[in-house]
Amino acid sequence: MKTTVSILAVAAVAATLPIATVASDDDTSIATVVKIAGIQWFNRMEEGVNQYAEDTGTNAFQVGPAQADPQQQAALIEDMIAQGVDALAVVPMSPEALEPVLGRAMEAGITVVTHEAASQQNTSYDLEAFVNEDFGANLMEQLATCMGGEGEYAVFVGSLTSQTHNQWVDGAIAHQEANYPNMTLVGDKNETFDDSQNAYEKAQEVLRAFPNVKGMQGSASTDVAGIGLAIEERGMEDDTCVFGTSLPSIAGQYLETGAVDGIGFWDPSVAGYAMNKIAQMVMDGEEVTDGMDLGLPGYENVSLDGKVVYGQAWVNVNADNMAEYPF
């Protein structure tokens, strides 16, 4: 399929997930299975999936488990296999945990494309918005600048098994160690399970254990919101630096108050659209090639490393420019 999209239209986010059923044996069906249903990040991704369905006439839909749990996600994929979908576009909570079920999907003749899972073996292609370690270094550079290149900082991940979150944090730590020797990482990776309340509680623990901490870097889209609330409650907006992956719709109020200093992200709707497009290309016998233009913002000149397709799709946002990204 040669669909090209120059501007991805934004549809209203549905209040509930679409019913995950295959319309008929004649329809091409692509199920996008995300880490968790109902959070803003994946609501935004669903807009792209729905837009792909509208543009192409494909029976494309999105589902996700009620909790960020690899076993719940695996069970949902099993359900999609049983329903006989033609393709799966999956954002794995744990790439390793999903290898068996994705292997069964491929054995059943189902095309598999993943996102945020560069190590995934049972997939035709894994789509990455960028080189993940570079994105983590980009966040750390901003954190270090805000901190004046010195002081203690802590890091947060949605899951210790989430490959991209750990790549971002590892890339950040490596950048700090190579360039900012007067900064010190305190504690272990704080695991939040993509839940802002958990991030809030972890941030409070960090602030109690390390009262001199100056910086925090989040990975799950909800991390900086939870961290920002903890910072705001303590009146520490001017004393701390907080950066991480999020969206303006999630972190905007804390960007405005200064409890969060900056966020980085890629547009989940474009990634959802791109995953579905790549899945259709695989089903049509087309290959993704180095330098290919997928016709989507940030994916005009993709690079290919084995099965991994890299775009150049990140943006950095703060209080000054967040109005440019109304999602």
Image: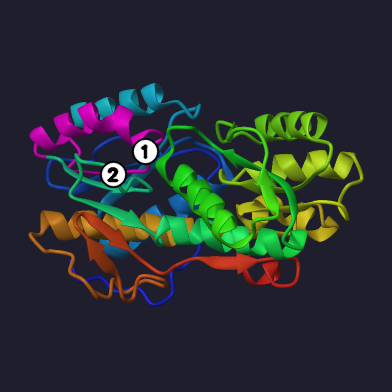
For badge 1, the amino acid type reads Pro
- Please check the rendered image and state whether residue 90 is part of the magenta-colored stretch, yes or no: yes
Q: Is residue 130 visible?
A: yes
Q: Residue at x 90, y 40 (%)?
A: 234
- The answer to which image quadrant residue 176 occupies is bottom right
Tell me residue 289's x, y (percent): 17, 69
Of the image marks 2 and 1, the number of the one nearer the N terminus? 1
Q: Tell me the residue that label 1 is attached to.
A: 92
State whether residue 319 is above or below residue 188: below
Figure disc tally: 2
Q: Residue at x 44, y 29 (%)?
A: 65
Q: Is residue 11 visible?
A: no
For badge 2, the amino acid type reads Ser
Depth check: give the residue in front, 1 or 260. Answer: 260
Tell me residue 167's x, y (percent): 45, 48
Q: CA distance from mark 2 to mark 1?
A: 11 Å
Residue interval drawn in magenta? 84-109
Residue 250 shown left or right of residue 30 in the figure:
right
Mark identifier at residue 119: 2
Q: Are marks 2 and 1 in contact (CB under 8 Å)?
A: no
Depth check: give the residue in front, 310 or 81. Answer: 310
